[in-house]
Image (cartoon, rainbow, N blue to C red):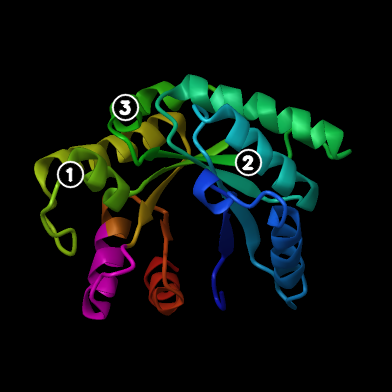
Amino acid sequence: MAGADAVALDLRADRLENAAIAPETVRAFTQRIGARATPPALFALVPPPLETDALALALSLIVPHQPDAILLSGPTCGADVQKADVMLSVEEAKAGLAVGRTAILALAGDNPAGALSAASFAGKSKRLAGLAWHPMALAANLGVAASLDSMPLPGSLATARGLMLLGAASAGIAAIDWLRAEINEDSVSEACRTALQDGFSAIICERREQVATVNRVLS
């Protein structure tokens, strides 16, 4: 994705149903990213710690390609980050890499328990570099049908957003926002400015067209 600081490969369980072709898919993706003159950081969106087998498979596929970080979906508390830390250490050792080199970004705001436990992530792993939220996933989890295109957000989502900011601040790590793929193009700049003013230091995009605006507003 041109202009992006980092690109994430989605390795959640529903994307790894055909395990036979998964290694080749990961290899082709990482080679394509690495071939660029100025390659972006490589992230991997991985299954929740609760899905132990799926997470182990995802890590075994991506760690040999030396990702800069994993984006851990579905963590419900700091102990889930500790579990992912241990699993990462095993895969790094197997790949002959320095143990501890891969950062963790915890997507704690995609589920109610993770948002409510935001403070529990502090101090659980030296790998932890950021707390992120996913308003669309959380809205679906909560059954919220209101529009997410503008502020103010529905109460439950606004609370979760605030908890992510507070949790990241208490842990001394980055708070990461998430832009909807369907957001009106005219609203992208406003959403980025609001995120920056509220304390988010990075934003995840789902569409390449959003990257230039995010970089302009956050730079």
Q: Which residue is labeled 2 in the image?
A: 103
Q: Which mark is residue 32?
A: none
Relative height, residue 218 to residue 195 (above, below): below
Q: Which residue is mark 1?
A: 158
Q: Residue 99, position in %: x, y?
A: 78, 32
- Residue 63 is left or right of residue 129, and the answer is right
Query: Do we see residue 101 in this rendering?
Result: yes
Instruction: Give the residue number, with chain letter if any, for mark 3.
Output: 113
Picture layout, residue 67 above or below residue 171? below
Q: Say few, some or many: other residues with alpha carbon within 10 Å of mark 2 (under 14 / 14 to 19 / 20 or more).
A: many
Q: CA distance from mark 1 to mark 3?
A: 15 Å
Amino acid type at image mark 1: Ala
Residue closer to the observer: 106 or 47: 47
Q: Indicate yes or no whether the magenta region holds residue 133.
A: no
Q: SS class of the residue under badge 3?
A: helix
Q: Residue at x 32, y 40 (%)?
A: 165
Mark 1 or 3, which is nearer the eye? 3
Question: What span is in magenta?
Answer: 180-194
For residue 10, side relative to residue 24 (left or right): left
Q: CA distance from mark 3 to mark 2?
A: 22 Å
Q: Earlier in the sequence, mark 3 or mark 2?
A: 2
What is the chief secondary structure element of the magenta stretch?
A: helix
